[in-house]
Image: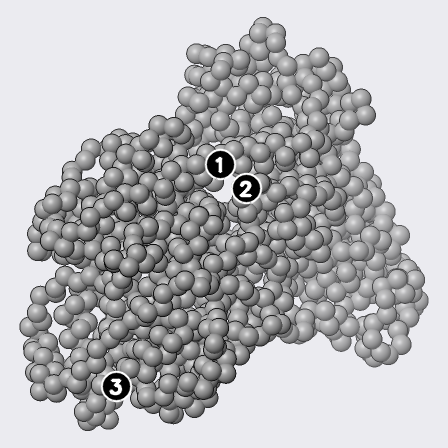
Amino acid sequence: MAVPARTCGASRPDPARTALRWPSRGSRLGPGARRPAAGPPRPLALLLPPLLLLPLLAAPGASAYSFPQQHTMQHWARRLEQEIDGVMRIFGGVQQLREIYKDNRNLFEVQENEPQKLVEKVAGDIESLLDRKVQALKRLADAAETFQKAHRWQDNIKEEDIVYYDAKADAELDDPESEDVERGSKASTLRLDFVEDSNFKNKVNYSYTAVQIPTDIYKGSTVILNELNWTEALENVFMENRRQDPTLLWQVFGSATGVTRYYPATPWRAPKKIDLYDVRRRPWYIQGASSPKDMVIIVDVSGSVSGLTLKLMKTSVCEMLDTLSDDDYVNVASFNEKAQPVSCFTHLVQANVRNKKVFKEAVQGMVAKGTTGYKAGFEYAFDQLQNPNITRANCNKMIMMFTDGGEDRVQDVFEKYNWPNRTVRVFTFSVGQHNYDVTPLQWMACTNKGYYFEIPSIGAIRINTQEYLDVLGRPMVLAGKEAKQVQWTNVYEDALGLGMVVTGTLPVFNLTQDGPGEKKNQLILGVMGIDVALNDIKRLTPNYTLGANGYIFAIDLNGYVLLHPNLKPQVSQTTNFREPVTLDFLDAELEDENKEEIRRSMIDGNKGHKQIRTLVKSLDERYIDEVTRNYTWVPIRSTNYSLGLVLPPYSTFYLQANLSDQILQVKYFEFLLPSSFESEGHVFIAPREYCKDLNASDNNTEFLKNFIELMEKVTPDSKQCNNFLLHNLILDTGITQQLVERVWRDQDLNTYSLLAVFATTDGGITRVFPNKAAEDWTENPEPFNASFYRRSLDNHGYVFKPPQQDALLRPLELENDTVGILVSTAVELSLGGRTLRPAVVGVKLDLEAWAEKFKVLASNRTHQDQPQKQCGPNSHCEMDCEVNNEDLLCVLIDDGGFLVLSNQNHQWDQVGRFFSEVDANLMLALYNNSFYTRKESYDYQAACAPLPPGNLGAAPRGIFVPTIADFLNLAWWTSAAAWSLFQQLLYGLIYHSWFQADPAEAEGNPEVRESSCVMKQTQYYFGSVNASYNAIIDCGNCSRLFHAQRLINTNLLFVVAEKPLCSQCEAGRLLQKETHCPADGPEQCELVQRPRYRRGPHICFDYNATEDTSDCGRGASFPPSLGVLVSLQLLLLLGLPPRPQPQVHAHPSRRL
């Protein structure tokens, strides 16, 4: 689902609205037609009266015939309405089904959904569920701080001293190129046995924890070994938590060193490509490790930045953006003599997925030129941070500068903007290999409460672009207990296969004292996290008592949905851990002012109730319905979530079966047996969780078989079964069987050209009669997931649903009369003043037979056996849809603009297609005359095939290719040699996938076949015109007359038009199919100018008077030996690279 369109890319006028014109001079106007005055078209109401007397026009090739007059076509419309109504009254059985329900009134009760009580109960249940996880989190965090404080640091610790289960060990043993396999790991890695656990959707071991260490961190370093040593004690706490709450899922400690220890143990789900997972870049860790951030990134693009250094900077900025969450705000600018934003964003914007993507694409376009001007860059950054007229995080403020070096300290800028309070932290990054003095960069960081980092090569990027979080964590650590508050994340995909989860996070602080001066430690140890699966939260919500169109939803402070029936990411995030699942409530539904107001109230933590008229998209995303909905919402206490309930008025009440008579249970149950289908019609049952031991199956026949086998062992009143679901299912089986008995069995469907009749119920029964018709039944057996069922409940009258066709697929194959058109209507009951709609009934029309019947009904014949009326040469007759089908086009189009019936035989195989694909000229005229309204929206959860690569050469992707001038430039040789040494010596093995195409991609690896993208969706629905209407499509000598009229009590539009004489006046074609939006949805540059309402976390820790800022980074600068570097480069070119050496990067203060 999605938001109202605000244009895909730059806004532009709609050409379709101007395509229809009044007849020009020389057009075929007959007597009685009046020409409007020049100027803009008048309102529709003013145009109707002159057209009531349609001119009598001679059709080409049939001079004795004229275009039918309006009253004639209205007569045809009434005949069509009467025929449809008559068939539905006889075969639909609406009235008879009402009587059946009333006759069985003693078998069910009418229950009421009380919205306020419902949402409060569900919110309370969710609060209780999450509170149990909070208690477990607090026990873990307290224990971790105690264990670490008691731990004695060991400088001489060895790998063989540590015994643990390495979660990636099995994958590395299977990989002969693994680093540990090559050098032989000395650590005592446990080999565990695992058992399948359905709760975790994985194999687990409850007796141990597992450890995951990022690929770019050396497992044998002293820092990591000490971390493994003291965190081992957490194992018992994990187990005790599970003993107290067996429903706990993953319990995780993410360490600031990069180590992840989680319980229960399970093997790591390593991707086929290189594993770049680092817990410190996960959404839950980022949220728990620091308060929200306002960040400005400035990048030096002066001429001194060589090709390779600039490449490093671009990658570093992209990695830095990945450390930001939706609670943060950011902007990126480049500078030389002047500073300018790299993208269209002129101010800080929310660091959401789409905005970050704009930045990442823009950064790739940076070009190095000019001279370095630190002053311009910093002044731009401070101006950005001091802009009071924009939405921002209003917490941590920081400037991140990437440069290759310089001498200017821009002290005057800091004095003007940041001193003496130093509210903005400055982090400086020296990028690439160079011979510049780094002292000015160190000074900038140290005098502004920041940190100085060096990024000499690709392998240093990930570590050094995330270490700044340690600095931001200082005020939080110093705040102590005040900062120990549990936060809940928005939705994201679990890395271990649990599916969509939310995580409760709690920071863990270092409580040790630094040195004899008893100075308090400022380091954050890491973040504790406990996952809660969305499915566990959904189980607390009512499933089937809300009806097909009622639902529960929940949002967070950003307005992102936690629960919503339209939260359905199409691409698994497990191959891209960096992107959280962020779907705004206004993108999950069709946005309007009422929903904006509801969303704001929920974010503010208020209670509320409101009935609104709104638009909803059909389940198959082909139709739009205007409906009434009741919204009720309450906050979920102790969390940053708010819960809402949406109910249609007809779902205020629901039926609850009361089948206490076991003989009756058995009687009705027998109608579920396949042996009864031949006489009673085929039964499809909704694949619901009726009992715990019921085996699910996508095949409904197999599912029914499993259900019957289970029911032979248990009773509907069994404790292992959902009695509400079972009783309602069995009751509806009996009620629909009585419909067969009273109505369908004695009727001859062929007489009225029907392929089938059917009844579908809230209880989960779909009965199709006769039995053979079930072979061609393609609707979803779950009524709540069937588009026709949900639309019938929302619409009065008869809803036609032609077979769905894609314009790219071949036309329908009309063989053996198997193609049918579904016509359905809701059964409305009124019991004691309480109204509800527990079922939908309908028929399936034989397409070919009804197309012939349609011709007769829209002709001058009264019945099919009457001979066709012939018009003499000296008389004038009106054309009709049967005799004059070569000159007259007659069609029925549904409310979505899809062809249902036509008098043109060659169009029968196009039934179900969007009418613009059949007759673009006529569909455009209907749209321009307000018979249809267009709704554009965006699907932010779509999956797209990757775009074909551009010019592929033999060179590895992403490598800088020097020019001849570069080869003659000694500076290039120096930097390139140093680059190759660092890249190949230290990180070439690990990070080759960043610079080279992955072979799996070339081989069509399914993991990379699709990626998340934004799709633009367009739907049409009936506009404001309800009356009969005539008009002329002006096209010079190719002009056409047409008449259009809505059929009462249906979703059909009856259109009669002259067939086009020529194709010289083809207007723009209206598009209905989903299209890929290259700009990733509405223009982001426009959207950020009107940001949606949100609230950040209510706590902020960005300052503490006792913070020690003396630890601000150190670096070394040394002049490289040109001879050594050139020799090493030649050595590498000869194919003799040294063996990669193990490396670890840790914060200088990380020694615990």
Residue type at the position of mark 3: Tyr
Q: Are dots 1 and 2 in contact, CB under 8 Å?
A: yes
Q: x and y percent of residue 629 in the render?
A: 71, 42
Q: x and y percent of residue 711 in the render?
A: 47, 15
Residue type at the position of mark 1: Asp
Query: Label for residue 131?
Result: 1
**Of the image marks 1 and 3, the number of the one nearer the N terminus:** 1
Say above or below: 492 vs 737: below
Q: Nearer the viewer, residue 707 or 1050?
A: 707
- Residue at point 80%, 22% (across, down): 832
- Residue at point 31%, 35% (across, down): 237
**Of the image marks 1 and 2, the number of the one nearer the N terminus:** 1
Q: x and y percent of residue 556 in the render?
A: 55, 49
293 vs 779, left or right, is left
- Residue at point 85%, 50% (across, down): 74
Secondary structure under tag 3 reads loop
The residue at the far front in this view is 517
Whether residue 309 is visible, yes or no, is no
Q: Nearer the viewer, residue 246 or 674?
A: 246
Q: Quadrant of residue 147?
A: top left
Residue type at the position of mark 2: Ser
Q: Quadrant of residue 1010?
A: bottom left
Q: Which residue is mark 2?
A: 638
Secondary structure under tag 2 reads loop
- Residue at point 44%, 48% (across, down): 481
Q: Nearer the viewer, residue 561 or 456?
A: 456
Q: How is the image coloured?
A: one colour
